[in-house]
């Protein structure tokens, strides 16, 4: 690679549409030009705890994330080295035992996660910082459906977690990072124009 990769951070509350936005952006690029890190894969490995204990962890606090490993991996990709990204299992609340995904360096590196704009060291490396925003009720409905369909949760479990940790931590740690965003993408319904503008800007930089 001739140029330093560009680093894009995409933050926003749970189920705001971060993954959806990333998927739409990458559609307009050659797959080899973009590598994506999902911060969810960097939740700490908690083999020391039982399943019942892991269920009680506050997963919306920054301490739940292995920021040091994430930073090492971002620096490696920025230095054109590949990484073995961990794989997280939401149903087990733990990292997969021996599964990793090889991620190759690319012209564009995207980091996506609720706290993607939280860490100052990561922000200092970033070229573009984005916050995806959706109303809280829309996010809650999306999360309820997703967690019951894909993450093995019950209705009561989703409601209880949302009220005790997800919502208060969103207000304490996620919302304050909105001020670091270069662009805020509204994602209650359509977001196509915002995605087009962003994709054009990225192409402009890597051209
Ligand atoms: N603009 C939108 N309109 C309708 N549904 C959406 C929209 N954006 C996201 N969703 C849906 O909401 C859910 C959560 O979206 P996702 O992109 O996974 O959020 P996040 O990565 O922020 O947690 C998914 O089921 C997704 O299909
Ligand atoms: O074991 C876990 C780990 C995380 N969570 C929840 O995941 C979301 C972040 O994922 P999004 O895809 O951005 O929604 C976070 O709000 C945690 O509460 C979990 O439930 N269990």
Image: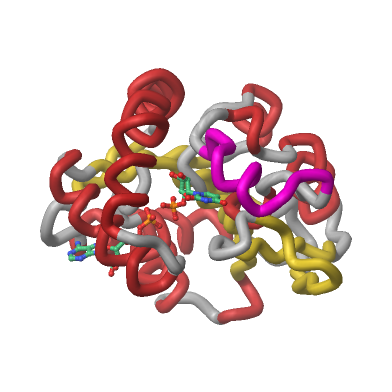
Question: In the shown orientation, is residue 131 left or right of residue 189?
Answer: right
Is residue 87 among the parts visible in the rendering?
Answer: yes
Q: Residue at x 24, y 54 (%)?
A: 194
Residue 173: give x, y in percent of width and height. 45, 23
Q: Is residue 72 magenta?
A: no
Q: Is residue 155 above or below residue 136?
A: below
Q: Is residue 158 left or right of residue 84?
A: left
* Residue under the image location 65 percent in, 78 percent down: 32
Rendering quarter of residue 86: bottom right
* Coloration of the structure image: secondary structure
The quadrant of the picture occupied by the N terminus is bottom right
> Where residue 87 sits: x, y (%)?
70, 65
Residue 74 location (% of width, % of height): 75, 47
Report the magenta residues as a range: 48-59
**189 with respect to 169 (left or right):** left
Above-or-below relation of 76 to 146: above
Of residues 174 and 126, the one nearer the viewer is 174
Quarter of the picture containing the C terminus is bottom right
The answer to which quarter of the image holds residue 135 is top left
Give me the residue at 72% from left, 59% from top: 95
Could you say which is closer to the camera, residue 66 or residue 22? Answer: 66
Indicate yes or no whether the magenta region holds residue 54: yes
Q: Residue at x 74, y 51 (%)?
A: 4
Residue 20, position in %: x, y?
35, 65
Number of marks in the rendered image: 0
Asked whether residue 197 is in view, the answer is no
Please name whichever residue, 145 or 114, is drawn nearer the observer in this view of the structure: 145
């Amino acid at each position: 690679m001739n140029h330093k990769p560009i680093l894009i951070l995409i933050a926003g509350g749970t189920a705001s549409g971060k993954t959806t936005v990333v998927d739409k952006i990458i559609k307009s690029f050659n797959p080899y030009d973009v590598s994506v890190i999902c911060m969810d894969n960097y939740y700490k490995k908690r083999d020391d705890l039982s399943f019942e204990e892991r269920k009680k962890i506050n997963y919306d606090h920054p301490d739940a994330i292995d920021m040091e490993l994430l930073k090492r991996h971002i620096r490696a990709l920025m230095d054109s080295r590949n990484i073995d990204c961990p794989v997280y299992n939401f149903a087990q609340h733990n990292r997969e035992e021996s599964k990793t995904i090889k991620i190759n360096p690319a012209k564009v590196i995207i980091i996506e996660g609720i706290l993607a704009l939280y860490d100052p060291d990561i922000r200092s490396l970033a070229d573009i910082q984005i916050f995806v925003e959706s109303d809280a009720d829309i996010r809650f409905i999306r999360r309820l459906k997703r967690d019951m369909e894909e993450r093995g949760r019950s209705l009561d479990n989703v409601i209880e977690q949302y009220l005790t940790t997800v919502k208060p931590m969103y207000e304490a740690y996620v919302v304050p990072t909105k001020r670091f965003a270069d662009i805020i993408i509204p994602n209650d319904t359509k977001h196509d124009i915002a995605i087009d503008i962003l994709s054009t800007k990225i192409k402009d930089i890597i051209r």
